[in-house]
Image (tube, rainbow, N blue to C red):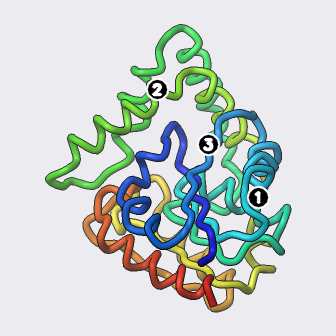
């Protein structure tokens, strides 16, 4: 079966994909790649490619999806299929990029926990019975990754290229998925990506915000399983 490489969102690690690793690792090689060692999308994607199998299925959530699109741009022949979850193909808006400098300064003064608590975590999830536990996990992941990863990822996001042409050129198995209540990367952004990729599957997960892998893992896994079958063909 085709190996699966997972790319987590900003300030997240493999725990973001815990239910997916559990579901798929018995039948295929599953690797969750870190994306915090460089401060540009190009370098982050090059590192993923350096560490990945020769050909693989690639799934990324949020910033992980943005890195996944750059991986696809650099090496389309190595990608057996791409799944883009709760992400954005466009370059960063200037007003969003402007907020990153003050956040970086605050983190440099020891404020990582405050930035995550006050400026990022409130945008992640819809209301649900597991909201508190998932937010706690988000904080644990962020604090374990630390200040340097936050700075690298912030700079990479601020200077990222638009990837709409990359998606338009891709004709392999593609899944575009998001939570219906995602306030950070809304449904219309995913309808755009779906429209750019001929033959892609669009899946909207009810009862989920920005992190459907944890908020609604069974529905997310079902969509990923159907996509993975196509990559194995």
* Quarter of the view holding residue 183: bottom left
Disc with the residue nearer the chain's start (1 vs 3): 3
Indicate the position of residue 102 as horizontal and vertical percent values: 59, 21
What element does badge 2 sit on?
helix
Indicate the position of residue 44 as horizontal and vertical percent values: 75, 44
Mark 3–mark 2 distance (CA, rounded to whole Å)? 13 Å
In the displayed orientation, state which residue is furthest to the left. Answer: 129
Check the picture and name the quadrant holding the N terminus: bottom right
Front one among 95 and 104: 104
In this image, 112 relative to 164: left or right? left
**Mark 3 in CB contact with mark 2 (< 8 angstroms):** no
The residue carrying mark 1 is 70
* Quarter of the view holding residue 37: top right
Picture disc at residue 34: 3
Note whether 214 is above or below 10 in the view shown. Answer: below
* Quarter of the view holding residue 196: bottom right
**Mark 1 in CB contact with mark 2 (< 8 angstroms):** no
The residue carrying mark 2 is 144
């Amino acid at each position: 079966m085709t190996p699966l490489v997972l790319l987590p969102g900003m300030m997240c690690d493999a725990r973001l994909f815990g239910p997916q690793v559990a579901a798929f690792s018995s039948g295929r090689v599953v690797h969750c790649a870190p994306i915090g060692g460089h401060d540009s999308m190009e370098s982050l994607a090059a590192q993923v490619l350096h560490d990945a199998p020769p050909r693989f299925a690639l799934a990324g959530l949020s910033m992980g999806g943005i890195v996944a699109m750059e991986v696809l741009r650099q090496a389309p022949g190595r990608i057996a299929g791409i799944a883009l979850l709760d992400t954005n193909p466009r370059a960063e808006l200037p007003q969003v990029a402007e907020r990153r400098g003050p956040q970086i300064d605050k983190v440099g003064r020891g404020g990582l926990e405050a930035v995550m608590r006050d400026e990022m975590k409130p945008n992640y999830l819809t209301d649900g019975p597991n909201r508190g536990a998932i937010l706690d996990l988000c904080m644990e992941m962020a604090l374990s990754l630390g200040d340097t990863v936050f700075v690298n990822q912030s700079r990479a996001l601020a200077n990222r290229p638009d990837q709409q042409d990359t998606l338009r050129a891709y004709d392999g198995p593609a899944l575009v998925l998001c939570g219906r209540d995602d306030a950070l990367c809304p449904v219309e952004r995913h309808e755009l990506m779906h429209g750019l990729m001929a033959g892609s599957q669009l899946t909207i997960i009810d009862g989920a915000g920005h992190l459907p892998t944890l908020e609604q893992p069974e529905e997310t896994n079902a969509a990923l399983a159907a996509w993975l079958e196509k990559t194995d063909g």
